Amino acid sequence: MGGLWGWYHDRMVKNTLMQVWPIPAFDDNYLWCIHDGQSALIVDPGDAAPVLQYLSDHKLTLTGILITHHHADHTGGILALLDVLGSHIPVYGPAHIDIPGRTQAMMEGDQLTIAAPGISFKVFEVPGHTLTHIAYFANMQANVEEPMLFCGDTLFASGCGRLFEGTPTQMSQSLTKFSVLPKNTLVYCTHEYTLSNIRFALAVEPNNANLINWANTASKLREQQLPTLPTTIGQELQVNPFMRCDQAEVIDCALRVSGEKSLPSPAHVLAVIRAWKDRF
């Protein structure tokens, strides 16, 4: 299997015992399906119909739903899935906010083990995009050969989520939690925003060789209608300006954009470039 499809396939099947595949929804959402060929978890099912079709096509039994935050494009299909497949299916989601259908409230440090398909997660609270946003991290274990992070709308390939509820400081702290994860951690974001994020990232760091190379690869993937995800923590530390707010070129750019003489912390840098991204 060669070419870009081969490259993408090889990246997707690294966790050979535990497969993770994107179910496209709406204009640019990915509803991630984690499965072992029999049992499946769905992450952020904003729409039930494509999930039901995927489960049927692949003869999978849904054993759990993971929710990262309350926005409708991540939660809108929960009740329909439970109505069709059974109200016994557990729905894990952030505490401190009402999400219809959620049965298990998850908080920072919680350990979640799901017997089928056989996977365990650590929960991170990662406010910024929303105040109660969480992420699910699966480190290497019996069925997982490489770490996996399901981060919702906190971290994107070459970008981060818009600050609808949280502050730049909260987002900076959340991204710092991700930055110390193993560099080979596969990052499963929930939107195909990569090309637009890259255009902005190049405005911040036009001389970043890793970013320039990634821009070329990502463009070719999208030309063939292939996802640009998953990315990795290691890659994001090289190409994502929001993960690089301690780097000289990002700081210098933020100083020019803001007109400030100094920005005392990475959170201040993030605040400047996130506001610029909002109007970019």
Image: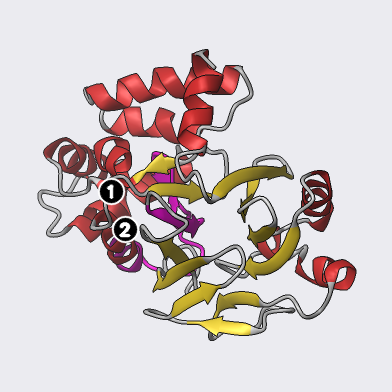
Asked if residue 262 is among those painted magenta in the image, a careful observer would answer no
- In the foreground, 30 or 168: 30
Residue ID for mark 1: 243
Q: Is 205 displayed left or right of 262 in the figure?
A: right
User: Label 2 sits on what residue type?
Assistant: Phe
Q: Above or below — where is 183 with respect to 170?
A: above
User: Label 1 sits on what residue type?
Assistant: Met
Asked if residue 167 is among those painted magenta in the image, a careful observer would answer yes
**Res. 105 visible in picture:** yes
Task: Estimate the x, y position of residue 189 in percent, counting from the top left.
Answer: 50, 49
What stretch of residues is rendered in magenta? 147-172
Question: Viewer-nearest of labels 2 and 1?
Answer: 2
The residue sitting at 46% across, 65% down in the picture is: 136
Answer with the quarter of the image where residue 89 lies: bottom right
Residue ID for mark 2: 178
The residue sitting at 41% across, 31% down in the picture is: 198
